Every structure is written in C-alpha cells, then in structure tokens.
Image (cartoon, coloured by chain):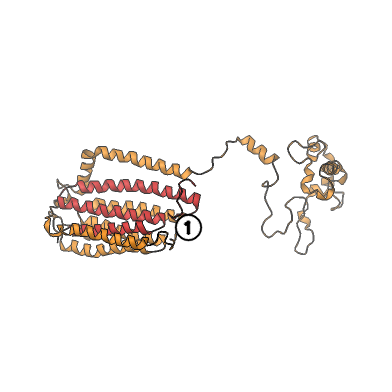
C-alpha cells in the first residue's frame, strides 16, 4: 500500500476542522478546530516528506508547529480579553470590537 | 513505543510495511473519531479531550512515518502544552463554555455540513489518484539523507539551510509572549498613582466605612462600634465586651463633644458612636476628645480607668 493513504486521512481531518469552524459558536472550540486543521496539514507535510524522500516537509511541519504555538498564545489571550469585557466566549455576542 | 518505531520502515521507507498498515488502520479511525467527537460534543472540555485523542494518534502516525522527532514534538508541544493551555482557559471561562444551540443564521449548520462533505470529497478525490500513480521514495535508512538519524538530519538542515527562518521564529515567539501580556493587562483600569503617605492619610482621615473589621458572622449586632456592647444569647449585655475606657469615662468630660455634635447636627438622638470623635471629617473641631488627649489632659481618664470608681453603665455609652 502506498503511503499516500495518509493524505486521505489528512483531507478528511481538514474537512472536519473546517466544518467545526463553521458550525461551532464557542470561540475556544473554533480555535481548537483551527488546531485540528493545522495538524491535518502537518500530516500532509510529513507524508510529502516521505514520498519525495526529502526532509523539507518535516522542517516545514516543524515551523508550522512553532507558528501554531505562538498563534494559540495570542488567540487565547484575545479570547480572554473579550471574555473579560463581555463575560462570554460566544462568537455571536462578540459583534463589536471595542465594547 | 519501540514497537511503534520498529513499525516504521527502516530500509528505504517508500512502501508501507505490515506493521505500519496495522498502526494506520487503528490510529486513523481513532483520529477521525476524535475530530468528529470534537465538533459534535456540546461541552467544550469534552471537545478538548477529543482533540487530545486526535493529536496523540497523529503523533504516533508521525513516528510511524519516519518522523520520530516531529512525533515526539507533537505529543509534547501540542498535547502537552497547547491543549493544556486550552483546558486552562476553559477552566478560567467556566461553565459558560457550553455551546448554545441557537442557530443565528438560518440553515447554517446544514450548509456547513454540505460544504464540509464537499470539501472532504473533493480533497479525497484529488488525492485518491496518487494512491496508485505515485511511487514513494522514502527518506532512506535512518530517516535522513545522510543516514545519521532523523534528529541529526533535521538539526543539520534547520541550523544550516534554514537558519534565518529559525531565527525569525524566535522573534515571533517573543512577539507572541509580549502580545499575550499586553492583552492580559488591557482593559484593566489604570490605578492612580498615590504615595504611601497619601494612602495612610486617606485611611486615617477618611470615612469610617472600610476602616477596621466588620462583625463576624453570627453576631447580631446593629453596629460594629466599640461603644456598642455585644449581646448574649438571652439578650443581656455581655460584660466582657464592654470597653473599660469608655465605661469609665465620666459623662461630664464629654459634654463639650456632645455640645459640638448637637450644635451641628441637631437633636441628640441622631448622634451615634462616631460622634465621640468630635468633628466629623478632617481637621476636627477644638475641644474634641482627640485634641484633649493630645494636650495631655487625660490623666483623670486614665485614673478613672485604673480605679474604676464609677459603676458601669453610667459612662458615655
């Protein structure tokens, strides 16, 4: 069997994450869906690295992990700032940026 | 863990071995189930735990796929640090984390599901052709170009070929940390700068509210003044709660105070315990108890306290 079957798994995981971003109302869960999409892309990169016999894909996945860590820190602090002012994390209630 | 690593193809690494196929067909459905459970569970904490399951499965799949370093990084960074951060924020947010069932846009869920199925179908169809058309190369023995091991090969590549992007990530991480701190302190009202002396003066000269301790729970007291005696369960006055100084102060010594209060705020029935302070507010009027104490004319009070030649209850209570 060819390792490209990992790409199928990755595509399905990405689709699940995208649906979650569209469906869920809680900002933190939306964020977790974004993390799931990043993970799916990482799996794709690792699989490409193996298929092509080059380490570039793994290095790219490594950088994606670093950027994802930074993104999570900033995103969660934004969610906490919104929660502190509006007492909610629902994306429906955060329709104004300042108040 | 060694079994997982042994399942990875050591030689060449193009085709999937039997062990890798077994790992994939177990962990792949587990990962999919985790993703589905994440978007279908109402409770946000349950979503986080489902996502942890997916991430752990993906980490093991990385190890199987000739990327042991990324596999361990996935488990340590994603499931260890990032998901812990998520759960931490969820705990700070509290019970509000439960999702609402109200659909703001009509038919949004159905549309999202259709679009998601379409996206997944398109991606799978685009990739499915490569199942047979592509002959995988594989990273080779030791998962690296020079057969020195995956970690060594990655380190060499990062610190030689990708040095500038790697340094830029340090700037990115610093920026993220500073930004998180800025957001943490944003929206918090800035305190006015006051010196310690100003705070002490405010505490001593300011209103009596907030100064001193309130009555403890279970005490049925109408005031927490020292001039108000505590009551025993049968309603009588508790002798131990009577202030010796107040009880032994002659009423005549307070005539000036009472006259002050009565002249300013009308009838004496409005006078409460804090009237003993003299003038209400900063400065104080001449003739108050404090001023006389400062002038050193309190020997009689002290003597009365020690000798207690007056019966209790006749004081200025």
Q: Report helix, strand or loop for mark 1.
A: helix
Q: Quadrant of residue B256?
A: top right
Q: Nearer the viewer, residue A91 or B165?
A: A91
Q: Residue B194, percent across and down?
A: 60, 36
Chain red in the figure, letter: A
* Residue to which mark 1 is pinned: B94
Q: Nearer the viewer, residue A4 or A91?
A: A91
Q: Residue at x 68, y 52 (%)?
A: B214
Q: Is residue B304 placed above or below B120 in the rendered structure?
A: above
Q: Residue at x 72, y 59 (%)?
A: B220
Can you say whether B300 is above or below B220 in the image?
A: above
Query: Picture quarter containing residue B240?
Result: bottom right
On the image, the x and y values in percent for residue A57 come to 21, 48
Question: Tag 1, which chain?
Answer: B
Measuring from the top left, give residue B260's x and y in whole percent: 83, 41
Q: Which residue, as the protein is rendered here, is positioned at the far front?
A: B106
Find residue B41 and report its horizontal and vertical position in percent. Answer: 38, 64
- Say which chain is orange: B
Q: Quadrant of residue A14?
A: bottom left
Instruction: Mark yes or no: residue B155 visible.
Output: yes
Looking at the rendered structure, the number of numbered marks drawn on it comes to 1
For residue A15, side relative to residue A95 (left or right): left
């Amino acid at each position: 069997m060819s390792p490209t079957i990992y790409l199928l798994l990755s595509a399905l995981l990405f689709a699940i994450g995208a649906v979650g971003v569209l469906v869920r109302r809680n900002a933190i869960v939306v964020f977790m869906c974004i993390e799931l999409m990043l993970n799916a892309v990482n799996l794709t990169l690792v699989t490409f690295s193996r298929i092509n016999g080059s380490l570039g894909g793994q290095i790219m996945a490594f950088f994606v992990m670093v950027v994802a860590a930074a993104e999570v820190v900033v995103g969660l602090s934004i969610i906490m700032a919104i929660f502190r002012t509006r007492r909610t994390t629902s994306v429906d209630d955060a329709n104004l940026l300042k108040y | 863990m060694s079994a997982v690593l042994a399942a990875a193809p050591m030689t060449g690494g193009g085709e999937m071995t039997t062990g890798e196929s077994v790992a994939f067909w177990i962990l792949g459905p587990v990962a999919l189930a985790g993703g589905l459970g994440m978007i279908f569970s109402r409770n946000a904490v349950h979503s986080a735990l489902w996502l942890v399951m997916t991430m752990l499965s993906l980490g093991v799949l990385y190890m199987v796929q000739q990327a042991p370093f990324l596999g361990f990084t996935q488990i340590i960074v994603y499931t260890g640090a990032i998901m812990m951060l998520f759960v931490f924020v969820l705990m700070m947010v509290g019970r509000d984390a439960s999702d609402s069932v109200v659909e703001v846009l009509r038919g949004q869920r159905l549309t999202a599901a259709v679009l998601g199925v379409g996206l997944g179908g398109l991606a799978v169809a685009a990739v499915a052709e490569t199942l047979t058309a592509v002959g995988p190369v594989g990273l080779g023995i030791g998962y690296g170009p020079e057969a020195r091991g995956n970690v060594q090969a990655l380190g060499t590549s990062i610190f030689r070929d990708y040095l500038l992007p790697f340094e830029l990530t340090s700037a990115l991480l610093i920026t993220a940390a500073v930004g998180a701190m800025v957001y943490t302190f944003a929206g918090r009202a800035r305190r006015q700068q006051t010196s310690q002396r100003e705070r002490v003066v405010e505490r001593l000269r300011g209103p009596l509210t907030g100064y001193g301790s309130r009555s403890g729970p279970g005490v049925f007291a109408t005031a927490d003044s020292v001039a108000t005696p505590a009551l025993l369960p049968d309603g009588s006055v508790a002798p131990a709660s009577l202030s010796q100084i107040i009880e032994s102060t002659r009423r005549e010594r307070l005539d000036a105070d009472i006259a002050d209060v009565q002249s300013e705020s009308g009838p004496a029935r409005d006078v409460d315990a804090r009237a003993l302070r003299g003038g209400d507010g900063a400065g104080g009027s001449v003739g108050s108890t404090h001023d006389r104490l400062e002038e050193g004319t309190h020997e009689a009070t002290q003597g009365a306290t020690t000798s207690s030649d007056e019966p209790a209850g006749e004081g200025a209570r």
